[in-house]
Amino acid sequence: MGTDLVWVGVRYRGIALPDIMKVMRSWIDQRGYQLRHFDFVFSGGGTLVRTQFTQASEAAEFADAFAGFLSRDCPSIERIGVAAPSEMSSAVHHQEVG
């Protein structure tokens, strides 16, 4: 994969958001990966964490590590199901990453 911007969506249900964010941020920082975008969306069915990577290979590795999915478009809470905690290794919070 090239250097196109790639989104990753990761759905969770039944896990505290601070715990998810801490593990993801640590994983990203340990590898020195650079994000373009990092936010989350709450719905009655769970939480969708959305990240955008500048390197497609990094996005694919992150998606694999967190049972996520790759997308060329920003993932939407309406389009896909929520992963239960056993399937993993509304308000919007948005944070642009420099």
Image: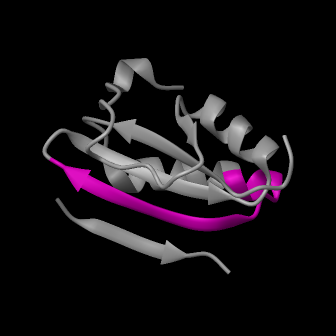
Residue most extreme to the bottom: 98
| Nearest the eye: 42 or 56 | 56
Which quarter of the rendering shows the C terminus?
Answer: bottom right
The stretch drawn in magenta includes residue 17:
no
Which quarter of the rendering shows the N terminus?
Answer: top right
Span of residues in magenta: 28-43
- Left or right: residue 77 versus residue 25 is left
Please provide percent x and percent y for residue 3: 84, 55
| Nearest the eye: 84 or 19 | 84
Residue most extreme to the right: 2
- For the point 46% across and 40% down, the residue is 10
Please provide percent x and percent y for residue 49: 43, 51
The stretch drawn in magenta includes residue 42:
yes
Residue most extreme to the left: 44
How are the colours assigned in the image? one colour
- Left or right: residue 57 versus residue 20 is right
- Left or right: residue 98 versus residue 89 is right
- For the point 77% across and 55% down, the residue is 4
Please provide percent x and percent y for residue 71: 56, 43
Total tally of numbered discs in the picture: 0
- For the point 53% across and 28% down, the residue is 67
| Nearest the eye: 74 or 30 | 74
- For the point 35% across and 37% down, the residue is 12
Please identify the quarter of the rendering in which residue 61 is found: top right
| Nearest the eye: 86 or 81 | 81
